[in-house]
Image: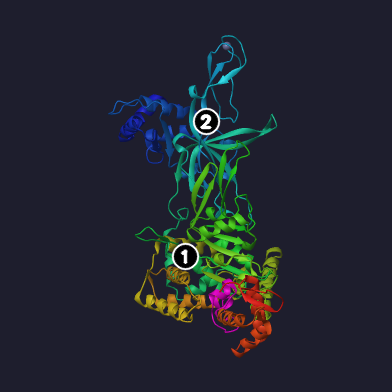
């Protein structure tokens, strides 16, 4: 073996002279006591890479040589570097192993794993060398501890053979320790695979560095421990990693390699004048129709531009979309397809598949009792998109956390030993079912799904997918499904029977005509989106600004005095975000008028589905989210005035008959007035001192 403390001393003094001086400085004045060695850049070229190879194959011996070698080095401060750690990063790609591919051959080897941090425990001291005092003669005995949960005691006192001891914490040496759990990237899982996970033990200056949701490369040694059944050790082993160094991945989508060839294809696509149609046709092509929803999702995938204003305010660029629809329609299918084409996404249901649910949670660990912080779907989807089916079924903890997650894009957890603010910079695509089975166009949306008005108003776009019978549409849909099946059958025949009467090429062409193959391959589309998000940051043009202003003011002008405005600043921000996404989609650095027109169309479409007051036919956001329209509010105002006037002349309160008569004179039908009286009583605006009489609750 080449490795020895002397060889390492030579390596450090050749390549890391400045760092040795800095390290000596840290030892003397405080700071991180680790030397970080770039494996690929320095170690892999030193002595034909032999030292590096030895580290990978025999890490325990070689790491100990490296530490001893570090202690032998000299520095300008003339400080001993004994006890300092040597940490290695930037391992060759060939040493990067997927969690699911870890096998026996990797045990006790040095390698790198990559993934997303799912859980972290609090940082606590761990005893490295325990001091015990003999309970009889007082002799102090030191016991080297292993990486076990249980504190190891001396067998007997070397002086008096007594077997009872008292632990002395202040005489023991400890190190900060933390356990974290790494999970495979959610977007790399296909077809409902469960993500594989592995625990990583961290010590010293590696602790407290990462948060749930961080994407990391862990470099370290694979360890195996027999599983336990009670006190017995089993033959089967559990693997974990003893961490040597952590690389936190900062850049968005850096796991995506976009080659020159890809780039050429992407730029070509962006030039295509049918690019919007093509991308829309590439989202869930087997689902017929719903082009408006598909365009909204396309814009969501590209996203607006996140901004940090000079005063520190952050404005989200992520676009939130909600699909509401009758059970049985294509909502879930759309969500699953988006999971396939989004560069980074997490798919889950409102009920959640883990204890952390949609956001994050702090729990006590069943293994060692430490408080553990676990990330939920929205944190794991940081810098990506969270796909939440049946979002209306989420737990109450998630409901309150979701406001913060959707607007500030953070999730705060404050419980016992855990106090953390996690990042959740993701777009949310949710699907919800109506409470009463089918969606009713004539009832406000807030009354039909189990989500609060404030939560609903955080979605930039809401769409309703109904199963309304419509003969022309039904015929087209049926034709599309029949055609899809027919082509599928022909493919099967071709696969199984050699003498089929058509060729593969003919079938491919047929699929294309029938629009059941995506216009853009999912793999290329993912790269296209990643490329756009990474490189395109469009800016509003004058024309675009003017058009946005016009539209916004025209919507607001419909509101009269004493009523809530139909469109709030929140919708204005949504409008800008969507226009940014529209420009990004064609890789344009400028937001043009055409982008704004496209977005106005979508917003109109969305509002027409959820926010039209059935009585006036006008768009009214308040009606959608609170169930009270402007026209209704006007009438309530009139009724209150009538009751107030009548109350003055009737001792027992305003008689219903009189109210209805006066209301009719002012153009409110008796049935409507009766209905409103019931509603007003329900919310406590008025009360009945006796049957058929009313009084104002607050004047
Ligand atoms: Zn003793």
The residue at the point 45 percent across, 63 percent down is 317
- Spot occupied by residue 315 in the image (x, y as percentages of width and height): 43, 62
Which residue lies under the disc numbered 1? 303
Residue 545 in the image: above or below residue 117: below
Q: Nearer the viewer, residue 360 or 289?
A: 360
User: CB atoms at circles 1 and 2 under 8 Å apart?
Assistant: no
**Element on which disc 2 rests:** strand
The residue at the point 46 percent across, 34 percent down is 204
Which label is found at residue 496? none
- Spot occupied by residue 117 in the image (x, y as percentages of width and height): 52, 46
Residue 603 in the image: above or below residue 364: below
**Element on which disc 1 rests:** loop
Q: Which residues are magenta?
A: 607-631
Ligand 1 quadrant assignment:
top right
Which residue lies under the disc numbered 2? 126
The residue at the point 42 percent across, 29 percent down is 66
Distance from Cα at disc 1 to Cα at disc 2? 45 Å
Q: Nearer the viewer, residue 679 or 468?
A: 679
């Amino acid at each position: 073996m080449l490795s020895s403390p002397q060889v390492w001393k030579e390596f450090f003094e050749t390549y890391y002279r400045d760092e040795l001086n800095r390290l000596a400085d840290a030892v003397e004045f405080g700071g991180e006591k680790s030397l970080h060695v770039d494996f690929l850049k320095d170690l892999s070229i030193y002595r034909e890479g032999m030292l590096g190879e030895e580290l990978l194959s025999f890490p325990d011996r070689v790491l100990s040589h490296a530490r001893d070698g570090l202690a032998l080095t000299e520095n300008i401060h003339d400080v001993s570097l004994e006890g300092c750690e040597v940490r290695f990063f930037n391992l060759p790609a060939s040493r990067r192993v997927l969690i699911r591919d870890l096998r026996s051959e990797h045990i006790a080897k040095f390698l790198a794993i990559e993934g997303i941090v799912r859980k972290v425990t609090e940082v606590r001291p761990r005893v490295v060398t325990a001091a015990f005092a003999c309970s009889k003669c007082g002799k102090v005995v030191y016991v080297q501890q292993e990486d076990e949960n249980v504190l190891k005691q001396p067998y007997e006192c070397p002086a008096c053979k007594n077997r009872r001891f008292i632990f002395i914490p202040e005489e023991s040496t400890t190190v900060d320790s933390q356990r974290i759990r790494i999970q495979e990237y959610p977007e790399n899982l296909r077809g409902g695979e469960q993500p594989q996970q592995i625990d990583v033990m961290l010590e010293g200056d590696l602790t407290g560095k990462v948060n749930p949701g961080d994407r990391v490369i862990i470099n370290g040694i694979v360890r195996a421990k027999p599983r336990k059944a009670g006190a017995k050790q089993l033959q089967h082993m559990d693997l974990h990693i003893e961490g040597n160094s952590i690389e936190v991945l900062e850049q968005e989508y850096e796991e995506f390699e976009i080659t020159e060839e890809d780039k050429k294809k992407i730029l070509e696509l962006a030039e295509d004048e049918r690019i919007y149609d093509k991308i829309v046709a590439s989202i869930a092509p087997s689902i017929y129709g719903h082009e408006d929803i598909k365009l909204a999702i396309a814009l969501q995938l590209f996203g607006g531009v996140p901004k940090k204003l000079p005063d520190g305010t952050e404005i989200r660029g992520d676009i939130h979309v909600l699909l509401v629809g009758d059970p049985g329609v294509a909502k879930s299918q759309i969500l699953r397809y988006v999971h396939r084409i989004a560069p980074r996404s997490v798919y889950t249901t409102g009920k959640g598949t883990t204890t952390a649910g949609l956001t994050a949670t702090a729990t006590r660990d069943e293994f060692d009792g430490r408080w553990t912080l676990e990330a939920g779907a929205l944190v794991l989807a940081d810098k990506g998109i969270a796909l939440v089916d049946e979002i209306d079924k989420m737990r109450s903890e998630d409901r309150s956390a979701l406001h913060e997650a959707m607007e500030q894009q953070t999730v705060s957890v404050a419980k016992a030993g855990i106090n953390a603010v996690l990042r959740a910079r993701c777009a949310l695509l949710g699907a919800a079912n109506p409470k009463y089975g089918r969606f009713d166009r004539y009832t406000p949306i807030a009354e039909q799904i189990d989500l609060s008005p404030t939560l609903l108003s955080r979605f930039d776009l809401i769409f309703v997918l109904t199963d309304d019978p419509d003969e022309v549409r039904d015929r087209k849909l049926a034709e599309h499904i029949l055609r899809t099946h027919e082509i599928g059958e022909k493919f099967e025949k071709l696969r199984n029977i050699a003498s089929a009467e058509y060729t593969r090429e003919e079938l491919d062409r047929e699929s294309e005509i029938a629009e059941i193959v995506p216009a853009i391959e999912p793999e290329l589309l993912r790269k296209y989106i990643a490329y756009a998000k990474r490189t395109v940051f469009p800016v509003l043009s004058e024309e675009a600004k003017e058009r946005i202003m016009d539209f916004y003011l025209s919507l607001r002008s419909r509101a009269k005095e004493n009523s809530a405005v139909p469109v709030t600043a929140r919708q204005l921000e949504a409008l800008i975000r969507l226009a940014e996404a529209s420009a990004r989609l064609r890789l344009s650095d400028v937001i043009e008028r055409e982008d704004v027109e496209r977005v106005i169309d979508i917003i109109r479409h969305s509002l027409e589905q959820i926010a039209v007051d059935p009585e006036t036919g006008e768009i009214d956001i308040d009606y959608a989210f609170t169930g009270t329209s402007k026209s209704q509010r006007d009438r309530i105002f009139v009724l209150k005035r009538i009751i107030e006037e009548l109350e003055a002349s009737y001792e027992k309160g305003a008689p219903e008959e009189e109210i209805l008569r006066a209301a009719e004179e002012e153009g409110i039908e008796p049935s409507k007035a009766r209905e409103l009286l019931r509603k007003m009583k329900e919310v406590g605006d008025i009360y009945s001192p006796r049957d058929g009489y009313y009084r104002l609750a607050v004047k």
